[in-house]
Image (cartoon, rainbow, N blue to C red):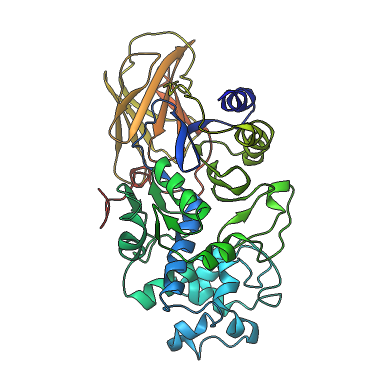
Amino acid sequence: MRGIDAFLDALAPLPDVELHSLMVVRHGHVVAERWWQPYHRDSPRLLYSLSKSFVSTALGFAVAEGLVDLDATVLSYFPGWDSLVTDPRSRSTLVRHVAAMASGHADEREAQALRAGNGDPVLGLLRLPPEFEPGTFFAYNQPCTSALAAIVRKVSGSSLTEFLTPRLYEPLAIDVHGWARDENGVEAAHFGLHTTTEAIAKLGQLYLDDGVWRGKRLLPAEWIAEATRAQVKTDGPDPDWRQGYGFQFWVSRHGYRAAGAHGQFALVLPEADAVVAMTAQSPNMQAVLDEVWTHLLPALMAERGPAGPWPTLSPSLPVPPGTAGPIPTGRYSPRRGKEFLQAVDLSEDAITLLDDGPPVTASLGTPGSWTTSGTHATAYAWSGEVLQVDVIFLDTPHRMRVTLDPGDATFEAVWQSPLVAPQPLARLGMPREVGAV
């Protein structure tokens, strides 16, 4: 498909755009797929806010089974909080309002909600008086997603993973998944799901087919329509963020999408009967969508019948430029005082990163190529008098460059794209939990 090549060619020179995987599904069949080394087909990916669409799907199952009423108040599911929530707007906030990020709050309230709820973001959300009538104003607000997850857990008596396993994961054969947990020990619903590119594409296909998977209905068509239409108006600097918001799905200029920070996408394109799944380290998400609409969508629309074969190559992400040379072993200290890394240890065949958590060690292989060990990949080269080591955290979009100066045994460490939620490096891998393989 020449349209895919044109799409990738258009992305190549753009700053802040780096694809890690691409899967294109048309008429229910995979017509193109590619992973950029060191990522591969089975690599789980931290989805960031694309996790929200899986939470929405859990809510859809709960609604279909009569466990949750979209028109019930959030407070009604937590009667023990009745005396603690006094604001009339908060007391009248419906499940459909938080599903649409329309709790009435003027902006993000995650930090304030945690304080107001003594660590419970849902109680905190209800104790913070909204500035607007619920349902009338959009603000991307993480505790709204936390509320949906808490309601599903309350009515089902199970975790999100346990609830989704027989309803979604098993029917769709999603075998690789794990949900990071928050300080309360529950799934970080708004950003913490890890799964594969194929799983992202499967979720998109389920929605494209109005809730039917391989001839069997899993979700009502009515839920699909409600979840993916604009429930509330949105505003923002980029055109695809001004099309409205559904139930934890964004409406796009073409179709709709599940989306997570740094370019994790499930684009559902009914006009082309297609799904495009991508993982990336691409903070410039609008630029990616612009090129989809310019190059990829027209090609899909023009394709008559089955698409021709598209070569499944294994290109590589760029490695640090420079020359080969010996590894300067030893311990290195931060060049500019305290950093998020406290020290770096180099041996002849490994780099160890030390922060506030357990040490993280990754193998060093041949200069100028990626070496994978567990959930990390490294590449290194000499640039003048310093050694540059890139460390990719394979279960995430993120890459760190560590620049080491053997002259004074110091280092600098910089994220190519920053973590959305800073945390010890050892916690960046996919959690192993019930239902994860």
- Report the quarter where the N terminus lies: top right
Query: Residue 96, image x and y in percent?
Result: 57, 73
Q: Residue at x 37, y 8 (%)?
A: 325
Looking at the image, which is closer to me, 36 or 226?
226
Q: Residue at x 44, y 74 (%)?
A: 151
Can you say whether 344 is above or below 99 in the image?
A: above
Can residue 174 be seen at all in this image of the molecule? yes
Q: Residue at x 65, y 70 (%)?
A: 105
Can you say whether 65 is above or below 171 in the image?
A: below
Looking at the image, which is closer to me, 323 or 274?
274
Q: Quadrant for residue 186, please give it.
A: bottom left
Judged from this view, the residue extending furthest toward the front is 305
Q: Tag count in the figure?
A: 0
Query: Residue 310, image x and y in percent?
Result: 48, 24
Q: Quadrant for residue 373, please give it.
A: top left
Can you say whether 299 is above or below 405 in the image?
A: below
Query: Residue 277, image x and y in percent?
Result: 50, 41
Looking at the image, which is closer to me, 346 or 300?
300
Query: Residue 284, image x and y in percent?
Result: 63, 38
Can residue 421 be seen at all in this image of the molecule? no
